[in-house]
Image (cartoon, grey):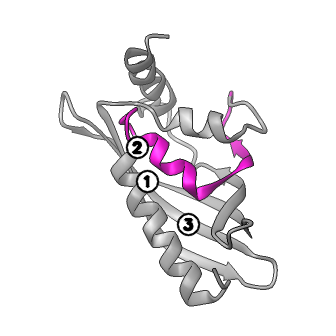
Amino acid sequence: MEFTHDSIRKWFYSYFAEFTECNGNPKKVPNMEKYFTEDLQFISYILGVKRPDDREGLLNTMVHPGLLESLEPEEIVIDEKNKSVAVILKVQFKEESTGTVFPLKHNCAVYNLINDKKGNMKINKITYFTEHRSPDEPDMKSLMKKYRQQALGS
């Protein structure tokens, strides 16, 4: 895939749409593997999260059935020369069992991209920053862990 502003923007909108469709569901999360290199580095600036993590670790964070998560790009900045993309994301969680919609958050991620041997665009590094939450808000990390443990039995 040629690394142009238009092709990358289109690719990322597809990525975020599929993320929103797949996340939570342990049967659909593996569909996201195609977006990442096998040696992906995921560096998350969330307290208490393993740094750096790998592709399996990132995919595992997406498993939380019953807790829907949507990522919507608000702004995408593309650096064609360095094959990097910075994205400001609107992140929304909804608990299916109660219908509770949690406060919208803004997070930021920097994605480093490569073309694999077949010429397909892949993310090989994500540096992820989250908006600070107030002490009055629910701890989404704990909720995600609860649903992941229910789904995976661990």
For the residue pair 16 and 142, the one nearer the viewer reads as: 16
Q: Report the disc number at residue 23.
A: 2
Label at residue 19: 1
* Residue at the spot 74% in from the left edge and 66% down from the top edge: 117
Image: 6 above or below 14: below
- Dot 1 lies on which element? helix
Q: Position of residue 26 (x, y in %)?
A: 40, 32
Distance (Cα) linking label 1 and label 2: 6 Å
Q: Residue at x 51, y 30 (%)?
A: 141
Residue at image location 70% in from the left, 54% down from the top: 126
Task: Determine whether, in the image, residue 131 is placed left or right of residue 64.
Answer: right
Which portion, as a residue range, is magenta?
24-48
Q: Nearer the viewer, mark 3 or mark 1?
A: 1
Q: Amino acid at mark 1?
A: Phe
The local secondary structure at tag 3 comes to strand
Looking at numbered disc 2 in the image, what kind of residue is underneath it? Asn
Label 3 is placed on what type of residue?
Ile
- The residue tagged 3 is 88
- Crowdedness near tag 2: few (<14), some (14–19) or many (≥20) residues, C-alpha within 10 Å: many
In the rendered image, residue 53 lying in the magenta stretch gets the answer no
Instruction: Assign the N terminus to one quadrant of the image.
Output: bottom right
Quadrant for residue 109, please give it. bottom right
Q: Is residue 40 magenta?
A: yes
Can residue 103 be seen by looking at this rendering? no
Within 10 Å of disc 1 (Cα), the crowding (few <14, some 14-19, many 20+) is many
Residue at image position (68%, 69%) is 118
Q: Secondary structure at mark 2?
A: loop
